[in-house]
Image (cartoon, rainbow, N blue to C red):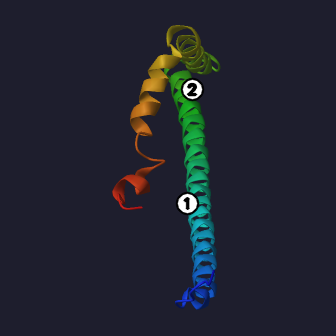
């Protein structure tokens, strides 16, 4: 039984080289995509931390201002801060007892819908 060689033996090393090149390229693309997503996540995290810090500082100083203003209006040295503290305690009780987590889950679903796989949905041929 004679095996005919119609040139396929010469193409097999090229085919294997092409396949290995394709695999290496795909690995590089995946690494770059992971690096891009990590960079984007890091930037988003830093942005969120700075916004959160600014928001907390604003709430603290506005609360101090309102406490001092109420103290001045009530001619007292402590009732203004007591009223502001009572407001925060009432807000805490409403959040802990009154609101269900499903309200926040609905908000999170609407906010984060289509964010993780957004790039996949824009590129249908991938």
Identify the secondary structure beneath mark 2.
Answer: helix
Identify the secondary structure beneath mark 1.
Answer: helix
Q: Nearer the viewer, mark 1 or mark 2?
A: 1
Local packing at callout 2 (Cα closer than 10 Å; few below 14, some 14-19, many 20+) is many
Say whether residue 73 is left or right of residue 39.
left
Outermost residue to the front? 1
The answer to which image quadrant residue 23 occupies is bottom right
Local packing at callout 1 (Cα closer than 10 Å; few below 14, some 14-19, many 20+) is few
Viewer-proximal residue among 55 and 34:
34
Earlier in the chain: of badge 1 and badge 2, it is 1
What residue is at 42 percent from the left and 29 percent from the top?
107
CB under 8 Å between callouts 1 and 2? no
What residue is at 59 percent from the left and 13 percent from the top?
96
What residue is at 64 percent from the left and 18 percent from the top?
78
Outermost residue to the top? 97
Gap in Å between the C-alphas at discs 1 and 2?
40 Å
Q: What residue sits right under mark 1 in the picture?
A: 40
Residue 21 in the image, given as x and y percentages of width and height: 61, 80
Compared to residue 69, the image places residue 35 above or below, namely below
Q: Quadrant of the C terminus?
A: bottom left
Viewer-proximal residue among 13 and 65:
13
Q: Which mark is residue 1?
A: none
Q: What residue sits right under mark 2 in the picture?
A: 67
Viewer-proximal residue among 25 and 11:
11
Viewer-proximal residue among 62 and 40:
40
Q: Quadrant of the N terminus?
A: bottom right
Residue 11 in the image, given as x and y percentages of width and height: 56, 87
Number of labels in the image equals 2
Residue 6 in the image, given as x and y percentages of width and height: 52, 89
Residue 117 in the image, given as x and y percentages of width and height: 45, 49
Compared to residue 11, the image places residue 123 above or below, namely above
């Amino acid at each position: 039984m004679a095996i005919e060689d119609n040139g396929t033996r010469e193409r097999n090393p090229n085919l294997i080289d092409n396949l290995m090149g394709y695999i290496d390229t795909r690995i590089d693309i995946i690494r770059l995509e992971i690096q891009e997503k990590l960079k984007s996540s890091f930037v988003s995290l830093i942005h969120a931390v700075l916004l959160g810090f600014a928001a907390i500082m604003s709430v603290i100083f506005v609360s101090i201002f309102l406490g001092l203003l109420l103290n001045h209006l009530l001619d007292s040295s402590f009732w203004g801060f007591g009223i502001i503290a009572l407001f925060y305690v009432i807000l805490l009780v409403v959040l802990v007892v009154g609101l269900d987590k499903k309200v926040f889950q609905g908000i999170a679903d609407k906010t984060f819908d289509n964010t993780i796989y957004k790039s996949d949905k824009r590129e249908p041929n991938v």
